[in-house]
Amino acid sequence: MIAKPLTKNIDMTRPPLEISSYETSDGYQSIRNIAKGLTPADVLQQTKDSGLKGRGGAGFPTGLKWSFVPQGEDSEKQKYFVVNADEMEPGTFKDRLLMEGDPHLLIEGIIIGAFAIQADTAYIFLRGEYKTAERALKKAISEAYDKGYLGKDILGTGFNLDIIVHTSAGRYICGEETALLNALEGKRANPRSKPPFPQVSGLWGKPTIVNNVETVCNLPGIFTYGIDWYQSLTQGKDHGTKLFGISGKVKNPGCWELPLGITIRELLEEYGGGMRDGLELRGFLPGGGSTDFMLPEHLDTNLYYDDIAKAGSRLATGTMILLDNETCPVGMIGNLMRFFSHESCGFCTPCRDGLPWVVAIFDEFCKGQGTRKDLQILHEHVEYMGPGRTFCALAPGATAPLGSGLKYFAEDFEKLIKE
Amino acid sequence: MSENLIASSASKARTLSDAEVQEIEHEMELYPDKQAVGLEALKIVQKHQGWVSDESMQAISKFLEIPISDLESVATFFNLVYRQPVGENVILFCNSVSCWVMGCESIRSHINERLGVDFGETSEDGKFTFLPVPCLGDCDKAPVMMVGDDLHRNLTDGKIDEIISNYRSKKESMD
């Protein structure tokens, strides 16, 4: 029984598997299974039934997302499948591992997703800095063409697919799916107004699905080993494995594939090796830079989407960043605010003007020159830049560590107020 | 005066090299319209020229029939497109949260001392340009940075000294 479908072929001490070895390890079996007679509607239904949720941050059910793509005789013929490989969320380092370690898994998943929505063209939107991933993906794609898994009439199904690697040139906002589409069209990467959603009108106005790398990498397992196997990977609520990462001052920082639902304590202590000697955990961001802080009292929370939400945060990317007792929480949050301020696309006012103001206040606090009025302004910005007040999720993402940090580390802010 | 400026800058378009044209034409096969190739063309020209000059902007604009203002709005948006000359090696220094927790600010000061440059500057010998970059996605090995296409992990002051001297001698041995 396969317990680690995402990383079973990954060994970073050697190059990724070439296609023949990959095939020996059940590689492309899912495509052969589908070619035996599954329809796109079957693939969509089974993806829904598997319970797979998006691994890019929002945790939206993947099958449901696909179902919004108009199908049928009178629907738009040209559709696109796009992989969001623009990994840039602070503290997130999971998609790099998947693409550098086992590029064929992503390609196999793309074929499944593109078949389900009947897209004949897929773009991998890869961040420009991921040079090793670019080389690995291009090599694997060329091998897949040679073996007939890509190109015309794949395995006699009549389905055609081309995959194109698009390397980007920076900017965090490109990870927002509508900004990504603008960037792919060669435009400035400002987010688009929704609706229309990309599923209906996306890339060049055509129906488009944008899925995260890790989400797509879940698909081959589901269509090779089946839904029962997939759902047996975890104990309950959410299904499948997830890449969990830890950065910060633990003994053994890293990234591991584990079943959803294990406790944070298990992740931190058994895999991360616990805090470095002499240090204590003060708090952590559970799923990247735009999630709310959690505290040591939350360590027994299970890593399920709902459970993390109940504890006031988001599972999001599953890569946690730790705050230890010798690191200043105000400085750490200030660093995040500088990041979000720098990466704002500048399109809408709360984000463009709010974030630099917040950064200026953090600069004063870090010099011990904060005032009560400043503190009040920070609190107000949690609301001004929060969900519903901005054009996209960038500034609301910034308010997650800001709002929770102001609440949990109030004493640290107090100490930096000049009396 | 402004008319003269426009006229003089319009006449400054350089001729794209055969290699540049060939690579841009290859990209044109992958996208349904020319605008989508704009960013690719900027990157191709930068790969060959080191950066994207006004003359190169004009050349790409003409070649792809993209208005110069549209192309400029893309060129100035993306942080990996350089509209100013850069040194032989570009240091992309991660200063996002995991690297910050792991002490990247002191590494930044060390680079600053060693090369005499801070973010946005090029060393006097023209060897290094020092730029910040969003999270490089290698956070379990923080602090990290890239020099050119190469990633360097678990940075310490000692490692920085080694990296700098390696890049300096690499270039000299090639000469």
Image (cartoon, rainbow, N blue to C red):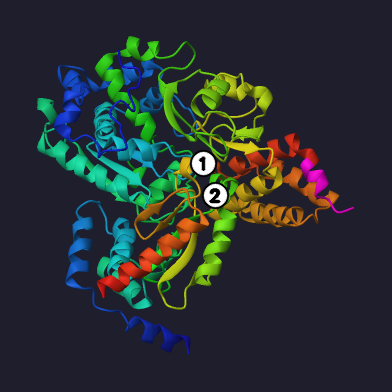
On the picture, is A96 further left or further right than A110?
A: right
Residue, far right: A419
Q: Chain of mark 1?
A: A
Amino acid residing under circle 1: Gly
- Front one among A355 and A294: A294
Q: Which mark is residue B96?
A: 2
Residue A308 sits above or below residue A227 on the image: below
The CA distance from mark 1 to mark 2 is 8 Å
Marks 1 & 2, CB-CB < 8 Å contact = yes
Does the stretch in magenta take in A415? yes
Residue A272 placement (x, y as % from top left): 51, 29
Amino acid residing under circle 2: Ser
On the picture, is A337 further left or further right than A29?
A: right
Q: Which residue is mark 1?
A: A91
Residue A216 placement (x, y as % from top left): 34, 30
Determine the residue positioned at 47% across, 10% down.
Answer: A235
- Front one among A294 and B139: B139
Residue A309 placement (x, y as % from top left): 60, 24
Q: How packed is label 1: few (under 14 Cα within 10 Å), some, or many (20 or more)?
A: many
**Bounds of the magenta span?**
A412-419
When asked about the image quadrant of residue B72, the answer is: bottom left
- Front one among A89 and B153: B153
- Front one among B95 and A345: B95
